[in-house]
Amino acid sequence: MKYALTLIAVFFLLILAISPLLGKGTGPADWEILNRNVMDLYEAGRYSRAVSAAKKALKAVERKKGLTHPDVVLSLNDLAFLYYRQKQYAEAELLYKRALAIREEALGPKHLRVAEVLNDLAALYYVQGDREQAILYYKRLLKIWQTPFGSKHPDVTRVLKTLGKIYRDDGQHEEALKIFRGLLNNWENSMGPTHPYLVEALENLVELYRDQGLTVQADPLEKRMFAIRELAKKETELGPDHPDIAIYLDKLAELYRIEGEYAWTESLYERALEVRQKALGRNHLEVATSLNNLAILCRAQGKDHKAETLYKRALVIRKKILGRKHPDVAASLSNLAILYSDQGKHKKAEPLFKISLAIRERALGSNHPDVAKNLNNLALIYRDQKDYDRAEPLYKRALKIYIEALGSEHPDVATTLNNLASIYKTQARYALAEAFFLRSLAIREKTLGPDHHYVATTLNNLAMLYSAQGEYAQAEVLFKRALAITEKTSGANHFEEAAILYNLSALYRIMERDDLASLYHTMGRDKETKAADE
């Protein structure tokens, strides 16, 4: 239908373009009358009579201008279009090809007027299901259009969308993916991450991934698609500056964050912050939420100084409104402490974790999951300082709380088991470490799925344990499985891939397989460079 409408538009433009050519010499007046008659008949739906009139118009211009004159193309295209409308595709094809040959001879193969006929031919082949020919002509058309118009021009975009769908229908998934990804990037860059136009690009990608059974890739894009629709609907209902809009901006930002698209995440979080500050004031609790979201993102990007400033501002707001002993104040203290811990500033982190722990125990009870979270964080500080005697009992207490509060197969149980196993590995208590790693792995595979990046983390840790015990064959298998998962799930975070590649390199070096060691070390360095660039 789209291409019928496009061709209708072209038809009328061509009819209008004919009139300036008429009125010179003898005969053209008849041609003009015939063309007006063609248009009237077409509009009345009298296609057969329109064809007869178009044939007469073609003969008239051929007599006046000659068989290969560029002006003949106008009548050829008119007649071809009428055949197209009556599904007489073979007749339309012959006329379009003749029109193409005339224009190529007169103007050269890269002229924009040549592109017009290429577009008509491509659409003709597309509607007949001749994918091979449609692809051929659309690709030729794009080569002509992209130089003067650029990849963001509406006509170029339309052709790219059609070409992507043809590739998808033809099973050429990689080609389709390149096009649909390129369109999504173009639209994001030109219109921003919330524009409703993105829905179509996301929908095309979701369909492409689902056709291949790639649910892991399709699901997050589909969620983003629904989030953009929901945001657009709410903006229409409430207006773009309503404080509730920030909630939907946060949802969309979180989806971008999960995919590692930090630049768009940041812009959405900043807009949410701006909306909240404008509607609610700079010291509102929801402003503190936005500050906290931005700080977490800054941490992930290595912007520690900015993260610290944002965390501190959120903490001040929460203390002022909620009081110093509120659980949300404990959360802000814990966030700030985690930042200091990651920087190796254990003396600054430890007292904040302890204050946060005390607040949560008093406000929530000693067996609350948030208390276990604090215990895990405090234990991590001691583990990093190799103070295992203080770390182990904290991990064990956290594990007991999680099991009682959340059940024995909760992902937080798996995380704590993994942490305990890491201590036992460092202490060379290999049997215990293996048992805890395997239990953690089983829980994560069951609750998160076999291809989750946390599963890859546990596989990597277990592989390192086997390597430390000289069980190199087992280690190799697990490292490779961890790498395969990470390649699918890491998104923009190529540091995870790099770490596993370096581990494999080290393993092969121990096994005296120097060729593989060098190969994986190079691959790891390339991933690390790519991650740094992004």
Image (cartoon, grey):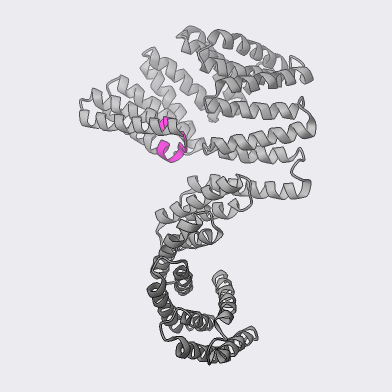
Front position in the image: 128 or 501? 128
Residue at figure coordinates x 40%, y 25% from the top left? 461
Is 8 one of the magenta-colored residues? no
Magenta highlight range: 485-497
Q: Residue at x 66, y 50 (%)?
A: 229
Report the quarter where the N terminus lies.
bottom right
Whether residue 1 sits left or right of residue 534 in the image: it is: right
Numbered circles on residues, count: 0
Occupied quadrant, residue 212: bottom left
Q: Does the stretch in magenta take in 486?
A: yes
Question: Residue 195's spot in the image, x, y percent?
Answer: 63, 49
Where's residue 9, x and y in %?
Answer: 59, 73
Classify residue 471 as left or right of residue 168.
Answer: left
Q: Vertically, is 58 above or below 275?
A: below
Q: Quadrant of residue 29?
A: bottom right
The answer to whether residue 479 of the structure is visible from this angle is no
User: Is 219 on the left or on the right of 168, as rendered?
Assistant: right
Q: Is residue 283 left or right of residue 200?
A: right
Whole-percent x and y of residue 220?
Answer: 54, 44
Residue 525 picture quarter: top left
The foreground one among 359 and 192 is 192
- Main SS, magenta residues: helix
Query: Looking at the image, which residue is at 53% across and 28% down?
Result: 301
Residue 524 makes an appearance in the image: yes
Q: Residue furthest front?
A: 25
* x and y percentages locating residue 409 in the rendered image: 53, 30
